[in-house]
Image (cartoon, rainbow, N blue to C red):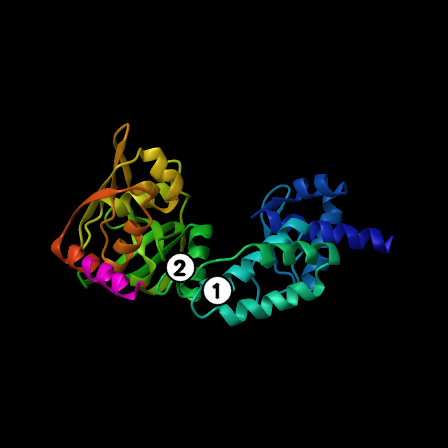
């Protein structure tokens, strides 16, 4: 009897972790018990330190809330492997969080069953990441966490934002999606003051303050938020202009330079245009270096000067 109750409570805890809110009737149906038994099991979870909130209603409702302390989490096999690999990735990808991610990874690997430890080890030894100087999607982990929670809860957020000209303005937004691209993190949000969708670079966001006001989820612009962000970035003004007419079909270039997918526009069956414009001369050089065919470049003088200087250094270094 005790083992049945323990198994049922573990199953209940697992269900609470998979959905924002459950009705008492739904939980009872899933667990094949009465609603009264569900209430008793919820009380037992609370006694163990799990912050389960109750919602009013005929059948009652429950959700697992955030608490003062972190209780144990239940992960299935696939989730455990995914978390372990994600922690390894975070150890090299987020400024200031590397050591913390490695400590968490060590704890998780210590309790992983042998069958899963082998999976994680295989993934970690078979997959490698390239860390470019000044590149890689890096962001302050505390800011990322604040924005991620606001996106999840549809909570209006206030912050200060500094644009590309250096001007700082207060913003009040409904965060929707975080997107990593080109070594930077971006927030897709609906600006409540301007009544329009905006894309914010996270390294220009300061002093984020959750307002505590939650709103219904908005329908995102387009089917793919990342594609929407990429299109906005491509249309945004940049400091340096660089347009490459590549002597290859757009599909050929896209297949061999996937990171440039949103910057490629077909011209005809044998030629495409790649917009490598950017605020960074170094990033422009990297994008052009990744093109898989010859091209003709139309660019600002400062871009051409930077490319010539880079090419001369390379030639001098070549044996």
Q: Is 266 on the left or on the right of 66, as rendered?
A: left
| One can see residue 106 in this view | yes
Picture disc at residue 130 = none
Of residues 198 and 309, the one drawn nearer to the viewer in this rendering = 309
Q: Is 272 on the left or on the right of 97, as rendered?
A: left
Magenta region: which residues?
Answer: 308-318
- Circle 2 residues within 10 Å: few <14, some 14–19, many ≥20: some
Q: Residue at x 50, y 69 (%)?
A: 98
Picture disc at residue 92 = 1
Quarter location, residue 72: bottom right
- Mark 2, residue position: 136
Where does the image place residue 19, in percent across and percent down from the top left?
A: 58, 46
Q: Residue at x 57, y 57 (%)?
A: 85
Where does the image place residue 76, in percent across and percent down from the top left?
A: 68, 51
Where does the image place residue 82, in percent across and percent down from the top left?
A: 59, 53
Tag 1–tag 2 contact (CB < 8 Å): yes
Q: Residue at x 70, y 60 (%)?
A: 112
Q: Residue at x 19, y 50 (%)?
A: 237
Of residues 143 and 157, the one drawn nearer to the viewer in this rendering = 143
Give the spatial CA distance, label 1 vs label 2.
9 Å
Find out whether residue 312 is within the magenta segment.
yes
Quarter location, residue 146: bottom left
Where does the image place residue 107, in percent across and percent down from the top left?
A: 65, 68
Q: Is 43 on the left or on the right of 230, as rendered?
A: right
Task: Identify the element where label 2 is drawn.
Answer: loop
């Amino acid at each position: 009897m005790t083992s049945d109750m323990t198994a049922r409570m573990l199953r209940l805890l697992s269900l609470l972790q998979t959905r924002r809110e459950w009705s008492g009737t739904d939980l009872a149906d899933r667990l094949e018990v009465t609603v009264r038994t569900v209430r008793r099991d919820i009380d037992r979870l609370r006694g163990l330190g799990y912050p389960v909130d109750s919602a009013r209603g005929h059948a009652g409702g429950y959700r697992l809330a955030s608490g003062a302390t972190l209780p144990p989490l239940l992960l299935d096999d696939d989730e455990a492997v995914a978390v372990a690999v994600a922690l390894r990735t975070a150890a090299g990808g987020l400024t200031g969080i590397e050591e913390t991610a490695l400590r968490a990874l060590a704890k998780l690997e210590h309790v992983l069953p042998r069958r899963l430890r082998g999976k994680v080890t295989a993934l970690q030894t078979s997959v490698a990441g390239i860390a470019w100087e000044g590149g890689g999607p890096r962001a302050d982990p505390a800011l990322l966490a604040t924005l991620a929670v606001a996106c999840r809860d549809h909570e209006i957020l206030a912050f200060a934002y500094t644009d590309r000209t250096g001007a700082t303005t207060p913003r009040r937004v409904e965060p929707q999606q975080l997107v990593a691209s080109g070594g930077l993190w971006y927030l897709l949000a609906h600006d409540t003051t301007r009544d329009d969708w905006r894309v914010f670079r996270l390294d220009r966001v300061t002093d984020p303050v959750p307002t505590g006001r939650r709103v219904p989820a908005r329908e995102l612009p387009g089917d793919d938020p990342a594609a929407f962000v990429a299109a906005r970035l491509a249309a945004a003004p940049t400091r340096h202009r660089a347009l490459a007419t590549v002597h290859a079909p757009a599909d050929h270039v896209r297949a061999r330079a996937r990171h440039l997918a949103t910057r490629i526009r077909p011209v005809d069956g044998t030629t495409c245009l790649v917009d490598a414009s950017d605020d960074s001369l170094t990033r422009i050089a990297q994008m052009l270096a990744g093109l898989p065919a010859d091209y003709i470049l139309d660019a600002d003088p400062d871009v051409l000067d930077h490319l010539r200087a880079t090419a001369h250094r390379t030639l001098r270094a070549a044996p």
